[in-house]
Image (cartoon, coloured by chain):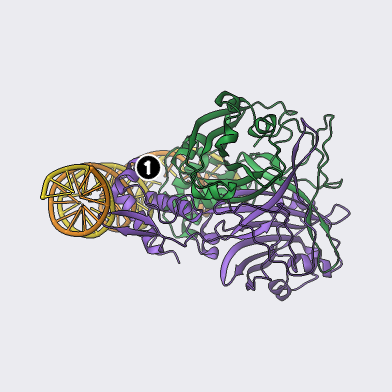
Chain colours: A green, B purple, C yellow, D orange
Amino acid sequence: MADAVEPLKARRIYLLLRERILNGELEPGSRLPGELSIAAEYGLSRVTVRRALDTLANDGLIDRRPGSGTFVREGNSVQPIVADLSNVLSHLVEMGRRTGVRLLSFAYVNPPESVAASLGLEPGERTQRSIRVRLIDGAPFSYLVTHVPERIGVTYSEADLASMPLLGLLERSGIMVEEASQSIGATLAGPDVAEALGLEIGSPLLSLTRVVWDPSGQGVEHLHALYRPDRYSFHMDLVRTGAVGARRWNPVVKPVIAGPETHKRKTKGPESSKPKSRPVRVSNQRRTST
Amino acid sequence: MADAVEPLKARRIYLLLRERILNGELEPGSRLPGELSIAAEYGLSRVTVRRALDTLANDGLIDRRPGSGTFVREGNSVQPIVADLSNVLSHLVEMGRRTGVRLLSFAYVNPPESVAASLGLEPGERTQRSIRVRLIDGAPFSYLVTHVPERIGVTYSEADLASMPLLGLLERSGIMVEEASQSIGATLAGPDVAEALGLEIGSPLLSLTRVVWDPSGQGVEHLHALYRPDRYSFHMDLVRTGAVGARRWNPVVKPVIAGPETHKRKTKGPESSKPKSRPVRVSNQRRTST
DNA sequence: GATACCTGTCTACCTTATAAGACATTTCCC
DNA sequence: GGGAAATGTCTTATAAGGTAGACAGGTATC
């Protein structure tokens, strides 16, 4: 991974062009302006532009044909895995994709103040902290840091955690998991995360922070998850509800269906096709996977 | 904004450390590792680390005490605005915060293929593309690129768009807005977006792509939104539903209530407080704001 | 008070990025 | 066939970023 970190200016146009290619603004198969044109447009030298194009070519995003021009390669929009808003990776099982987990760390620690506060811990109360990486088809896509109050954490072992979803373990232990609250943001990859996810330091990441409570309002789990946006994104369908003047979007609540049902609907903006049917997503899930 | 463009590596740790400070991972008042430690950790020279710290100090995020260390300054964790998953900025009005819009661009264009496809346009059909920046209390937090089929776009003017939400205009024009589908990811800021949002190139951004359809399944709006994660994040409450073995999270569907109701509940993981009451969020909204 | 560790500052040196060209070669189109 | 325009591949020169190390002075701890 991490082929040659381009310097400042070259990186800028690289990122710029990359964006425009990935989000479809520069259409697949179309020709870019000549290197000199681009250089002029951005006030750079041709060498610099060239370096950016080199990287793009290396990424497989463009084709360069001497004498002819530089072209956006087709079929490049790598569709990320899709999770619906409840963070369930549907389809994975049905698609026959192998998922895996790597347990990077497992320890009892004094949690950061923010974690302690959100879990509602007593001062000095310790937590079990685990760091896991989830893989799909061998490729890492998420980096999960969970904190569980010590008294709850002791109900399962390190080996359990390496093989089963945390929520499953909690429920197995008799913990009632009822409510949660989560927020989604974005950050940059630090050294350890970058390493674990096979990224360069400074790559963009989707971040999700979720706090889970039992019915009594006692904090049970604090999850901080980081996702590679090129391999994972959140998706949700919405319907417009409410009276005129107070109309708003509401999520479509998806029923859980038992039988297999292949649902074909593109997700990320690019390449979505026009929906003939209503955008109600029916998915069957076997397993919750954060 | 953007004082002195630091070079590549220096900027990276700057952005990284900045992230970790702003989201509370590095707790206010705590001491950072020594400059040499940081340098070692990231594989950089001390000078480079120093440049990053200089910038942080300049931002007022850290205090450097010679002989003692470098400390995270207090009171810096700016809580982002919170939108629930339907992307409504609740609370804004009640909190008396001023929102604004800047219309950066307004034109009829040939849309990127991806946009055309997701809207279900005929080949060659044009769209009205607008680029807007939304502000809160004068500070920009989102960068919105919308595509609307030309025949629909003509029902309102540039001035309309600069002052009213797009969905409102569409509904005023008699368009039935019923269904939408959106996905959330993350990217880095390119030059124009960075400029518009007052960020440095390479800052992390939340990205949202939403396609809106009318009841017939005809595409009505394609929105590509980029948010500053330090000023804006998505939040949602979840409840655990379903039978044992197929349990999953479902969003809490929030009723729309008329009266004012100040709801105190922190959002981003850091600094959340323990919920005494059930995590059902009651919010009153006046206006949809993307 | 001695010691370890921290930031502040400076110097010298190396590596890399960028700029500005020149020139060859290929492709496409008239 | 000829010419325009594109990429590929070199130069040479300048600017900027980054590294390594030394040293001064402050602060905390034992």
Whether residue B113 is visible, yes or no, is: no
Q: Quadrant of residue B156?
A: bottom right
Asked if residue B36 lies left or right of residue B115, the reply is left
What percent of the width, then of the height, locates residue B233? 62, 56
Vertical relation: A225 (above or below) B119: above
Vertical relation: B7 (above or below) A77: below
Tally of numbered discs: 1
Reading the image, the residue beneath label 1 is B42
In front of the other: B6 or A20: B6
Please give the chain letter of the residue carrying mark 1.
B
Whether residue A273 is visible, yes or no, is: yes
Q: Quadrant of residue B232?
A: bottom right
Quarter of the image that includes the C terminus of chain B: bottom right
Asked if residue A151 lies left or right of residue B200, the reply is right
Q: Secondary structure at mark 1?
A: helix
What percent of the width, then of the height, locates residue A271? 72, 45
Q: Residue at x 63, y 46 (%)?
A: A211
Residue type at mark 1: give it.
Answer: Tyr
